[in-house]
Amino acid sequence: MQEGAHVRRAVLIAFGSLIAFGCILRFWKLSDVGLWYDELWTVVGASHRPFGEMYREWILGDSHPPGFFIFYFAWFKLVPPTEFWARLPSAIAGVLTVVYLLCGTTRVLTRNERLTVAAFASLSYIYVFYALTVKQYSALLLLTTIVTVVYLEVVEARRIERRHAVTLTVAASALAYLNYFGLVYAALLLALLFATFRRDAGARQRLLRIGLVCTAICAPIAPFLYLQVKYNIDAWQPYQVSTFLANLEPYLFFNDPMFVAGALGVLALVLIARAAIDPRVRQQLWTSRNAHVAIIVAAFGGFMLALGLFKPIFYVRYFLAMLPAVLLGLGILTAAAFPLDRGWPAVVLLLFFLHAAVTQFQSIDALQREQWDKSVDFVLQSRAPADAIYVLGAKTDKTEFDYLREGDVDGVFNVRNLTFYRYYFERRGAASVASRLNVALPTVDFVRELARRFHDTGATIYVLAGHHLQYRGEALATLERVTRRVEVTPMNGTVVYKLTF
């Protein structure tokens, strides 16, 4: 007995250490790398400007509900808009997700299941990546985890307590303000609860009240949802279902496809064998709780597949709302196949998660963003005082929403480039340089205009291009003809052109 207790203690310490390591990874790259385009959209848009301007020029036409922008508008009244402080809320949400899986799921998961699910979430690449990113998705994962667990508590208890109602109302409303697919997921859970309690008049009344309160709270975001549907804001994105499928495994687990595929195969074989041999395992698997997890995954997955027939939604980030339910199901199956109170199953799982921890550390340690900051540093170190600096983008005499209404996708996503580069020049103490930045269009006509302006002057100008925007085709060929020299310095998602006339 004493030896068994030592083994269980060692297993708990080992799992706890790996889970803690995954939480630490969420703070590993908070400030070491610059912001990328989507992060700049929030950080620059929500800081140092009046609320009305933020609403008119940044929130309108955004592909997400306004809640995230509003949160950061308030957050940047308390902290500076730097990489660390901007990413910190996502990192905290990521850690809270893991802590909740360990400590907030005792009513629906066994100890082994809690440890396994928390380990999966702690060391999942996409969970860690979005915890290091100024995006809604880390908070989305936290809230969908909470509503999923509360849903399972309700169906297990066969009643809706006051704390359930309050948690569902708050979390569902918050999801609606964060992400439209989060709104769909929360609505789906409420609908499934209503179906579960269709014969219980009291529970139906409570659910109806929850739905009405959520509807009232979420009514202000209806116009934003209308704009999303009307203008199909994200429809510009090229996508392939094969790419989506290829990304699922490394994003959900880690970037070692052969190892992960082999591990999943072993899991399936061991689970089938144990279920065939041990009736207790079959009993452990054949429960109403597990059936509800499967129903959630099937229902939301079915909705997304149906929507995908009409809309380009096959990106992993659009399916994030269902990942907590997927990991819950995976953790339950894994705990049944590899019970942690036995020696070799615990060792097998520990080896898997140890490999996950090593791989994730390597991935996160090598993480690079679009190097807007480094391209600014490069120009500041290279330029002469008289050199003009341009930013490749779209004219700023229109707002993003103006470009959206005109159907100009390039304008929608390039109109902010000038503002983003100004942000980093000002951060580098070069406010006077930032104020003199000009917009350059990636067109043949604008290249010719530059040639007329600088022909035979001997001038050197720099053109900064961000978010994979470049001179291409005839515009690039014209640029090479009208200048004496073109030096191109590519970075990670950004390009610096040095033009000598």
Image (cartoon, rainbow, N blue to C red):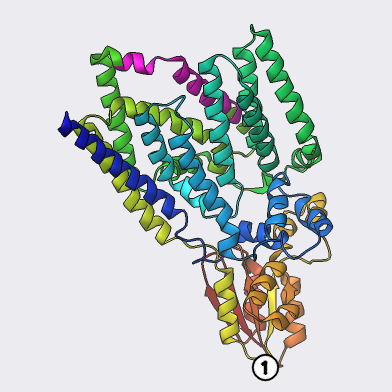
Which residue is most to the top? Answer: 199
* Left or right for 433, reference 365: right
The residue under the point 67% across, 30% down is 169
Residue 194 x/y as whole percent: 65, 16
Q: Secondary structure at mark 1?
A: loop
Residue 90 in view of the camera? yes
The residue positioned 36% from the left and 35% from the top of the image is: 116
Q: What x and y, as percent, mark residue 345?
A: 23, 32
Can residue 352 be seen in this snapshot?
A: no
Percent position of residue 44, x then y: 69, 63
Above or below: residue 292 compared with residue 44: above
| Count of numbered circles on the image | 1
392 or 482, nearer to the observer: 392
Q: Is disc 1 surrounded by few (<14), some (14 to 19) or many (20+) residues within 10 Å?
A: few
Between 402 and 346, the one lying in front of the other is 346
Residue found at x 42% / y 26%: 109
Q: Is residue 432 magenta?
A: no
Quadrant including the N terminus: top left
263 vs 455, left or right, is left
Amino acid marked by disc 1: Gly
Q: Position of residue 164 (x, y in %)?
A: 61, 25
Q: Which residue is mark 1?
A: 458
> Left or right of 68: which side holds 344?
left
Magenta region: 281-304
User: Which residue is pictured at 25% across the width and 29% down the height?
Assistant: 341
Q: Is residue 293 magenta?
A: yes
User: Majority secondary structure of the magenta segment?
Assistant: helix
Q: Could you say which quadrant of the image residue 328 lies in?
A: top left
Q: Residue furthest front?
A: 2
Q: Is residue 122 above or below residue 452?
A: above
Residue 91 lies left or right of residue 116; in this view the side is right
